[in-house]
């Protein structure tokens, strides 16, 4: 994966998002880089897969984003 031209950018964004969520006590177990994004060399950065979560985590995420 490290040969992708935007690897550092995607990895940093992933780490930043994981840290920001953890401040609010939110863990998305499936949060990771989208591996299929590395299938070819593209001008755009790899995708970040947010993954699945249970309803309680979804509500904490909504509360943290201030959607209420």
Image (cartoon, rainbow, N blue to C red):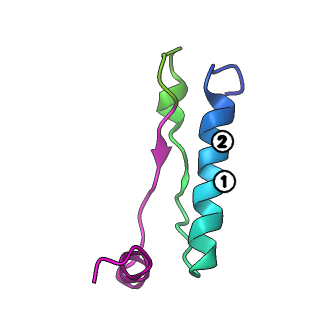
Q: Is residue 51 magenta?
A: yes
> Residue 2's x, y, as percent?
72, 26
The residue lying at 63 percent from left, 55 percent from top is: 16
The residue lying at 47 percent from left, 23 percent from top is: 44
For label 1, the crowd category at 10 Å Cα-Cα, with few meaning under 14, some 14 to 19 and many 20 or more, is: few
Q: Which mark is residue 7?
A: none
Q: Which secondary structure, mark 1?
A: helix
Q: Is residue 5 left or right of residue 60?
A: right
Residue 13 position (above or below residue 5): below
Dividing the picture into quarters, in which one does residue 17 lie? bottom right
Q: Which residue is mark 1?
A: 15
Q: Which secondary structure, mark 2?
A: helix
Residue 46 position (above or below residue 65): above
> What segment carries the magenta color?
46-68
Q: Is residue 53 magenta?
A: yes
> Residue 45's x, y, as percent?
52, 29
Dividing the picture into quarters, in which one does residue 19 lie? bottom right
> Residue 29's x, y, as percent?
55, 65
> Is label 1 in contact with label 2 (beta carbons under 8 Å)?
yes
């Amino acid at each position: 994966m490290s040969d992708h031209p935007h690897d550092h950018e995607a990895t940093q964004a992933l780490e930043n998002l994981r840290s920001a969520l953890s401040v609010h006590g939110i863990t998305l177990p499936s949060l990771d880089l989208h591996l299929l994004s590395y299938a070819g060399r593209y001008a755009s950065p790899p995708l970040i897969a947010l993954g699945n979560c249970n309803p309680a985590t979804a509500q904490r995420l909504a509360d943290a984003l201030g959607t209420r």
